[in-house]
Image (cartoon, coloured by chain):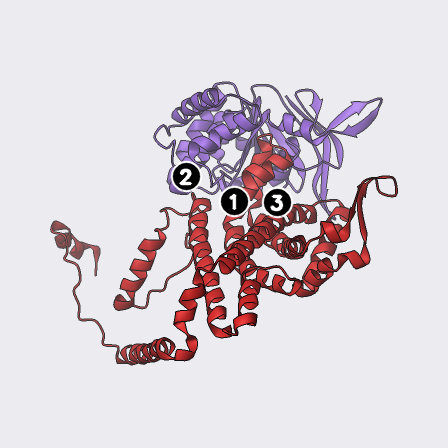
Amino acid sequence: MVNAEAVRKRFGRLEVLKGITLDVRAGEVLCLLGPSGSGKSTFLRCINHLEKIDSGRLSVDGELVGYREDGGRLHELRERDVARKRAEIGMLFQHFNLFPHMTTLENVTCAPIRVKHEGREQARDRALELLARVGLPDKVDAYPAQLSGGQQQRVAIARALAMQPKLMLFDEPTSALDPELVGDVLAAMKQLAREGMTMIVVTHEMGFAREVADTVAFMDAGVVVESGAPADVLENPREERTRSFLSKVL
Amino acid sequence: MSSGEATPHQARRPEDIKAVPVRRPGRWIVAAIVLVVAIAIVRSVATNPNFQWGVVGEYLFDGRILHGLRVTIELTAIAMGIGVVLGVLLAIMRLSPNWLVSSASSFYIWFFRGTPVLVQLLFWYNIAALYPKIALGVPFGPAFVHADANTLITPFTAAILGLGLNEGAYMAEIVRAGIISVDAGQSDAAQSLGMTRLQTLRRIVLPQAMRVIIPPTGNETISMLKTSSLASVIVVTELLYAAQLIYSVNFKTIPLLIVASVWYIVCTSVLYVGQHYLERHYGRGAAREQTATLSGRVLRGVLSFRRSGEHLRPGGGEHR
């Protein structure tokens, strides 16, 4: 589903990704672990082209991200095509980023109506179904400011799922939540994983990684230090850097 | 103090505190002085015969004054309309990644903010001296429509162009401030859902920017209503010029200036109320509770004078 080959990304002089090579198969859950500033979030943002990569190759579902290959040369995609591809990838953010001027229902139906040109009725029906699924059937008309952090993040999950994505990206979805609210969001994510969604999750929740992930990759200073099954990487890390990080967070 | 002592309180609800308020003699003295001064002013205004209140009443609904009022309102509305549209365009241009586009916007803002609007009005009024003929057509190529500048640019159009183009420069900065104030995460979220830049701007960023844009735009509209009186120098018979025309004949200068002032105040008051409701509309979702209505707020403001030093705060609403 996602193939990264020697992906590099610079911000000015600072190189944040120094050659990332990763593969995620359809239906697989990949958890990205690592200290802050290691490039996890940047890599995630590259996957749906919120950031442009400087070198390497990055493709989703067999198609290059942000470019089209024609006669051995890369052509930048037009904005509309980039947007069309982004629509197939759901993304969750650390700070939820719900649209504060819209109700919960409008947040969820907005993109299906504006981007996929679905009928209002159809979008509404699916939104109600999704909001029920994340456990918020009674918050349809609430504004984001009236919801707790955990509820907001679950609305954000419903908003992303309303676009029927084939891949979901999670950028530290529980880092801004009170500890007692983390569980609800993780439960919604676990359910999603069970249903076979392909997911890439940047997280500090080791328990979630151990339980849900098919693969865990540990990143530091812009490179993947080691990756493998959660049992191997979390229980018996090969690299010293992984071991010292895990000893601090576990 | 310890938590153990708290249990007996929970048995029955504690009564509300009823305490004797602190005496504030200073506050009462100041209030008395203000009251005396206010009464003195009102009495003097009401009894001074030079104000000629009878004449004011006579001309308040005079046909020429009402026509001037209509022109003033038209000028304000059209010039603000041009200003807002131009302001949004210039703000978007200024934030464009294209260097030439953003510089063009910066240049426009620099130029129109850098010259007095009165001078701009006089320029537009005298445009025929610069361009006697105005033509519409292909640049450096053939023209399709010709027109004489003097017939095309009437005093009224000159006033609209002068006020509107100048306003565009100010509105551009207001709109830009609004756009910048919206968290970058909002654009990320919108784009990750597949919205284009334009959709993101229209559906997500601008509606939120409105909360920041509306209060200063209300100011600008009120200011425009008054600035439109400058059009009197290029013989547009707006409110002030209509009053001037009358007193140049009958020499009742003061009462007619009062007539004009009364109408200006009426209009700005209406705008103030309108701005309040507009702010409430765009503030939805921002505060946990809806802001109180204007009437409720004024009432509470009057009551709070007795209670404590609570202040009326315009356009409340807590930000996340």
Q: Is residue B107 above or below residue B240?
A: above
Residue position for label 2: A143
Q: Amino acid at mark 2?
A: Tyr
Q: Quadrant of the N terminus of chain B?
A: bottom left
Chain coloured red here: B
Give the CA distance from mark 3 to mark 2.
33 Å
Give the CA distance from mark 2 to mark 1.
14 Å
Question: Dividing the picture into quarters, in which one does residue B19 lie?
Answer: bottom left
Q: Are marks 2 and 1 in contact (CB under 8 Å)?
A: no
Which chain is mark 3 on?
A
- The colour chain A appears in is purple
Q: Nearer the viewer, residue A136 or B10?
A: A136
* Observer able to see residue B80: yes
Residue position for label 3: A37
* Observer able to see residue A213: no
Q: Is residue B31 above or below residue A221?
A: below
Give the CA distance from mark 3 to mark 1.
30 Å
Q: Is residue A179 left or right of residue A117?
A: left
Q: Are marks 3 and 2 in contact (CB under 8 Å)?
A: no
Badge 3 and badge 1 in a common chain: no
Residue position for label 1: B208
Q: Is residue B101 above or below residue A137?
A: below
Q: Amino acid at mark 1?
A: Gln
Q: Nearer the viewer, residue B193 or B230?
A: B230
Badge 3 and badge 2 in a common chain: yes
Where residue A41 appears, as percent x and y from the top left, is 60, 38
Which residue corresponds to the image point at 50% horizontal and 25% vertical from the top-left?
A161
Which residue corresponds to the image point at 57% horizontal and 64% vertical from the top-left?
B241
Which mark sits nearer the N-terminus, 3 or 2? 3
Badge 2 and badge 1 in a common chain: no
Where residue B119 appears, as percent x and y from the top left, is 70, 65
Which chain is mark 1 on?
B
